[in-house]
Amino acid sequence: VGLDVFAHVVNTMRENLTDDPWHKHFELPGWFQYLVEQGALGQKTKRGIYQKIGKEIHVLDLHTREYKLSDAKVDDGVKDILRERDWAKKLAGLRSNPHPQAQFLWAVFRDVFHYCALHLESIADNARDVDLAVRWGFGWDSGPFEIWQAADWQQVAGWIAADIAAGKAMADTPLPLWAADPVRTGVHTAQGSFAPVGRDSSRQEAVGLKPDLHPRSTLPVYRRQLFPDALLGEERHYGETVFETDEVRMWHTGDDIAILGFKTKMHTVSNEVLDGILRAVDEAEAHFSALILWQTEPPFSAGANLLQVMQGLQETPDAGLFGKLKGAANRVKYTVAGGGGLGDVLNAATGNVPKVEAVVAKFQQTSMRLKYAQVPTIAAVDGLALGGGCEFSLHSTRIVATLESYIGLVEVGVGLLPAGGGCKEMAQRAAAEARGGDIFPFLKRYFQQIAMGEVAKSAEMAREMGYLRQSDRIVMNKFELLHIAKEEAKALNATAYRPPLHPRQIPVAGRTGIATFKASMVNMLQGGFISEYDYNIGCRVAETMCGGDVETGSLVDETWLLDLERRNFMELLATDKTQARIEYMLKNGKPLRN
């Protein structure tokens, strides 16, 4: 927003809120005015209260008005308090800790609670609207009234009253009577949220509610929000269960449209999730008119469960399928140009290559089941849809995505390539876009996106990148996502939906395309923009997307491209450098360049 805009807001408040108990605080200090005059307005001008110089953070010295290196640290005791998940214990810890950092944080919460309580009647219809405004407008996970309620309403109200009496609060006006009511336990309930008496009291009494509880609106526009943003104290019932495992749940809301959600952390894709999706497609084909992949909370999916992959790789050779792969890889020297390839070596070493391949093949099978199911499959995407999550979306009949969706095939970041049908699908789309002409110009951008691990920064950008088709939908209100996904499913069925035919003649770029991609990557390698291993991965992506060592324009089917995906994925997975990338990502949350 900028310090200049903040200054305008403060000045407007000072001029118009003359009766506000906090009015004396609506003044800007001299150093703040100085920054505005100097054009140091914050992030949009690259400096403000703070300035980043290289990798260092500098802060304004209020006395000299020069920037100095910021060496301040959060107190260890305060860190421990902030790690506490129980709001009652967290606020109690901040209030009782004498460290200035703790006292500052407690004062922020106290004065926000005080301000919201005192002004509720004049600024909002009910407490729900205040909490949602703060959550949506300022990015809070919980609104001020929610936090207060979670921390024991009476306890916090007593602390606020005591601080007001002691002159510690920013305003000396006491809490309103409703907030200080000794029997109050909060403002949010299953029946509604607190509203000052007099607001819609006749309507509330007519439906049997207490006059101070304001239920959610039932206007048609709000009925599109099948599961609106839930507040503390509200009950949430997600339909009737069809089946449930430790990692997925399939359910419905009383109609003939099934919904499948993941229960894994970040909704990552594990072997059990794959089983769940396959079972859900079978159930949907037998008993429902459509299947929607939708999560009760974002993200849609952060991709494959890397921890499960690494645990499998680190097993003894006899401990599992990935263990057999690891054991074999440890007994052979991996080379990119190794004759018949690592598959032949593994076959000789273990005799279990078919079983190892089955792990990846199930992922591909799952994507293909979503694509060719006898009922429409809808990917209702909100937030991250990376790697395998992106691949499931690409293979669904329709994608319905919120505007703030971040979609991409990012496997190269951990030394792999998309092997759940992602390379195949983008190669197929490039061929379709070429309309019988030169494939390479269309394939080039998809190759670059995959080889660079690019992620769309919005659903609109995802459409520009080709991850969303023109038939896919973008939703502005995330809480209408499931409703619109259902409407898409109904519309598809209203036109007698049939799954697409399996394409048997997909033209590919072949060895000429591979050579062209390699030439461009050699320039990047020699320029120091990519590592030798990045080049190796890029060559495998190129081979997969170009259809392998065949003539340009050769016609292949999806199975051919999936086989290339699977082979190249497995060979990369067997290398120490890929395993190092996966381990580094798990430990540090960012990619390793090796």
Image (cartoon, helix red, strand yellow):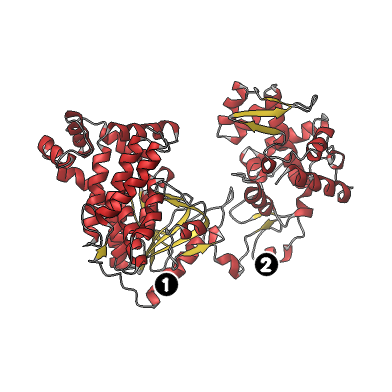
Residue 67: x and y in percent read 72, 27
Q: Nearer the viewer, residue 415 or 380?
A: 415
Dot 1: few (<14), some (14–19), or many (≥20) neighbours within 10 Å? some
Tag in front: 1 or 2: 1
Q: Which residue is mark 2?
A: 206
Left or right: 348 as drawn, with respect to 311: left
Three-letter code for the amino acid on which mark 1 is drawn: Lys
The residue shown at (34%, 66%) is 432
Three-letter code for the amino acid on which mark 2 is drawn: Ala
Residue 7's tag is: none
Left or right: 517 as drawn, with respect to 358: right
Q: Which residue is mark 1?
A: 490
The residue shown at (36%, 44%) is 521
Q: Nearer the viewer, residue 152 or 552?
A: 552
Left or right: 63 as drawn, with respect to 366: right
The residue shown at (88%, 49%) is 15
Residue sticking out furthest to the bottom: 495
Q: Nearer the viewer, residue 379 or 108?
A: 379
Residue 344: x and y in percent read 13, 41
